[in-house]
Each structure stands twice: as C-alpha cells, then as structure tokens.
Image (cartoon, rainbow, N blue to C red):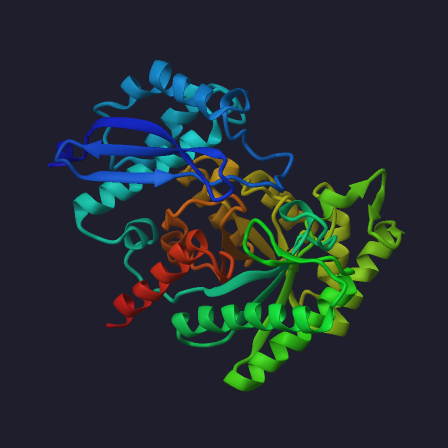
Amino acid sequence: MEDRFEISGTSLRIILDSRGNKTVEATLALKTGAVGVCSAPAGASTGATEVIPFRDGRAEESLNYFERNVKESLKGFNGLNQVGFDALLKNIDGTENFSAMGGNVSTALSIALSKAVAKEIGIPLYRYVGGNFRMKPPKPIGNVIGGGKHAINGTTFQEFLVSNDSSSFLEAIEINSLIHKKIGEKAKALMKNVSIGVGDERAWVLSISDEKAMELLKDSANEVANERKVRVYLGFDAAASSFYEKGKYVYREKKRDQGEQVQYVIDAHKKYGFYYMEDPMDEADFEGHAEITKAVGKNALIVGDDLYTTNASRIRKGIETKATNGVLIKVNQIGTLTDTWDAVKTATSASMKNVISHRSGETTDDFIAHLSLAFSSTFIKSGTIGGERLAKLNELARIQEEIEY
C-alpha cells in the first residue's frame, strides 16, 4: 500500500561541516517509521550560477524559514514521488535559486526522502536512485596538492589530483593515499625553505609555483605507480574563475590572456600527461573550454564545474558549443535530486562523462558514494585522506563487495 510511503514528519538541525562552519542536517520519517537523514556540504570555490546555500547567508535563517513555511507542507506527501517532492520544494521557495529556503535545506530534504524510501523498500540507496542494472564503481580521484580558495599560500591552481586503474576500489583509494604520503615526504626532504601545510581537503599546501607542483606530482605518482604496478592518472582543478581578473588569468609570476591560458593548459597536458582537467578557463568562457577540448579531448577529460553548476540548461549550452567532454555533479549546486538527475541525463545524452563530487566543506554523509553508482560516474572526487572524505570512499569499498557477490 502506497500510504506507507506518506511523510509523517520532517526536522532540521544545524551541524558543523569539516571547516567548522554551520550547515544543516535533515531528518525525514515515513508513516511506517522508516527514516532518512542527510547533511548538506558547502563549497568555498562556488560558481556564480549555483543556488544560494542559506537564506540571507545564515543557516539559522534557513532553519527559521523551514519551521515557518516548509515543515507542515511536507506532511502526508507520497514519498514515492521524488520528482513531485522536489517540485514542491521549489514551489514553496518560489525563487529561481532557492534564496528563500536555501539550497542546502532543499538538498538535505531531497536526499533524506530518497534514503527513507530506499530503507522502506529494503534496498540500498544506489539501487533506488539508479535502478536495478549492473553497476561498476567509479574510479576515485583525490586532491593531493591544494591551493586557490582551499588554501593559504598555495598554488594558483586549486587542486592537483590523482587516480589509478586498480580494479579494487579499496586498493585504488590506498594507492591515492600513498601518493599523498609520497608528496609529503618529498616536499619535506627537497624543499627546505618552503612552507608546508594542509588545506581544507587535507591536500598538501606548498608555497611553490604551479610548475614545481606539477613536477612533484608527476614524480611522486610515477614512483608509487612503479611500486604498485598500476597506471596512475594525473589531474587538476584549476578553478580558473578564482584567479581571472579583468580579462587576465593572474598567476604569481605573470598574467595570461585567454589564448595564453588555453595554450598553457594544452602544454601542461602534453608535458605532464594530465588526463583530468577541470575548469581550466573562466566560468563564462565556453569558447576557451571548447578550444582545449578540441585540441586534447581525445586523450583527456575536460570537466566543467563552475562552467555548469549541475544545471541542465548550462550543460546544454556546453553541448552546443562542444565546450567539454565531462561534467562535475554536485547536488547542492542545483538543490534537488531531481534536478541533479536531469543534469546527468542531459550530459549522458551527449556522451559526456560525469564525475560526482564532494565539496571543500564536507560532512560525514556518504550519499555521493551511492549517487556515483546510480549515475554511472566515471570518477568520484572525494579527497584522499580525512574522515569526512573517507566516509564516501570506504562506503564504496563496502558496496563493491556487495555488488560483486
């Protein structure tokens, strides 16, 4: 009987994310007592077209709005209708960017519903969202050297990343962590006058040029790859919008115009073998992204994050302009599971690969592990170390055991 899926109640509370900032956690209960709980993460490097995380920028204001305008409206709703539930959240909010309710509130509620319904049906979340088809875990890709808005005194590029081709997800995340350790060892041994720390995602923060970071990344990855007999994939998230000023890309040593930035990225791919390249140009520059994709897209994954912000309409523009061959997926950029699924379907229809991603300010919620399977993601981007990052990665190691037996 479908009435057992009726929502009996919801609650919202404030918790802290991995940076110690306030975010929200939602609890949603069905008539039978099945409960779903979800907490929403937060980003430091955010795209201009993302939804607004909190009303007036404060978690408390969103909590108050929920109590006044949302809570009672959700009671009795049929939880099996995820699309209708997400539409209801948008209707209650009444804005185009969740500025009344807050996108973190809608994200937490939307995912909490899917968790509760999956629990009531008696299947894992990834099966409920993705359907009953053969699933293959994504490859883990994680941040090992950090800069940009995720660190102080680090590289201009926001993240340097690694992944590998191990068939065991547990071994794959172990190898990524070994590369992280190797970079730390090499940095301490070779860079006597360089400050060394860790950033928001526990990646190494080194006061060196981006080129030096690329060399250190490649050398460390090659050593571990040879030791463990695996192929390692190198990557970066430039987050280029964060250092784009008045038509120039501002590095420590020089400024680059659009053409120079395009060539810089292409040269980095050729010299260091970067396979994964995210947001190499400003978030408004579809043309610049397209030039890079045309030049190296057959041998590399060019991924849009700030370029798309998990928004199907922006992804369609990317398809029309041939801007990238990959798209980053973050639920709280768009605010609901339904809109996220729409973004993934739009990208998949054009043979674009999708990458499910954490945020720099994370919680221990593991829902993106399940979504990476449901969405058939090529990679899951969730750091290399740190409890809030490993919560997702260890969950995928467990799931791999489950789906292979």
In the depicted structure, whether residue 46 falls above or below residue 279: above
User: Residue 113 lies in what quarter of the image?
Assistant: top left
Question: Residue at image x 76%, y 49%?
Answer: 287
What residue is shown at x 19% (from left), y 30% (from top)? 6
| Residue 134 seen anywhere in this rendered image of the structure | no
Q: Is residue 303 above or below residue 235?
A: above
| Residue at x 46% of width, y 59% of height | 377
- Counting from the top left corner in percent of width and height, residue 158 is at 67, 52
Instruction: Name the one closer to the observer, 336 or 394.
Output: 394
Quadrant for the N terminus in the image = top left
Outermost residue toward the front?
192
User: What residue is at 57 percent from the left and 52 percent from the top?
Assistant: 327
Q: Position of residue 289 (x, y in %)?
A: 73, 53
User: Which residue is farthest top?
Assistant: 68
Where 116 falls versus 141 (above or below)?
Answer: above
Count the marks.
0
Q: Where residue 26 sits in the image (x, y, percent)?
A: 33, 33
Going by the image, does 268 lie left or right of 7? right
Query: Which of the pair 331/83 is nearer the observer?
Result: 331
In percent of width and height, residue 212 lies at: 76, 67
Q: The C terminus is located in which quarter?
A: bottom left
Front-lying residue, 38 or 115: 38
Drawn side of residue 31 relative to residue 299, left or right: left
